Amino acid sequence: MSHNCILYFNKSINAQQDGKAIKIENAIDAMGGKSFLKSISTLYCNSETQMDGRAVNWITKEMIPNKESLEIIYQDRTVYKS
């Protein structure tokens, strides 16, 4: 399964990995800072799974304010779109 997503955090969060605290703020700064992330108005995610040995793509879009869509593509054909 593969994912291509943009993640957006609107406040400081500390995560634990192997007993060491990782500052997500450092990652946000590396991506262009909080002001750049706050300017993002769309979350786009393309996930790929397998069904019966064939690729299925799940494409989700979330937009400001409160808009979203879902598209399912199976064998290069759109089987669901909202």
Image (cartoon, rainbow, N blue to C red):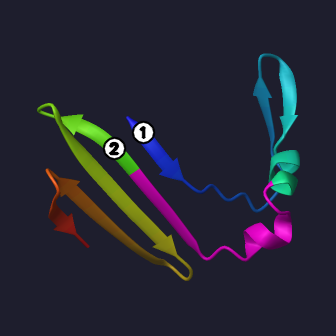
**Side of 59 relative to 55 (left or right):** right
- Quadrant of the rendered image containing residue 77: bottom left
Q: Amino acid at mark 2?
A: Glu
Determine crowd level at label 1: few under 14, some 14-19, many 20+ residues with C-alpha closer than 10 A.
few
Report the Cα–Cα distance between label 1 and label 2: 5 Å
Residue sitting at x 84%, y 72%: 35
Dividing the picture into quadrants, the one containing residue 59 is bottom left
Q: Which residue is mark 2?
A: 48
Q: Nearer the viewer, residue 10 or 40?
A: 40
Question: Of all residues shown, which one is farthest toward the top?
Answer: 18
Q: Which residue is mark 1?
A: 2
Element carrying mark 2: strand
Image point (26%, 73%), residue name: 82
For the N terminus, which image quadrant? top left
The residue type indicated by label 1 comes to Ser
Residue 35 on the magenta span? yes
Magenta span = 31-46
* Callout 1–callout 2 Cβ contact below 8 Å: yes
Q: Residue at x 87, y 55 (%)?
A: 29
Q: Is residue 7 above or below residue 52?
A: below
Residue 78 occupies quadrant: bottom left
Image position, residue 33 (x, y; %): 86, 63
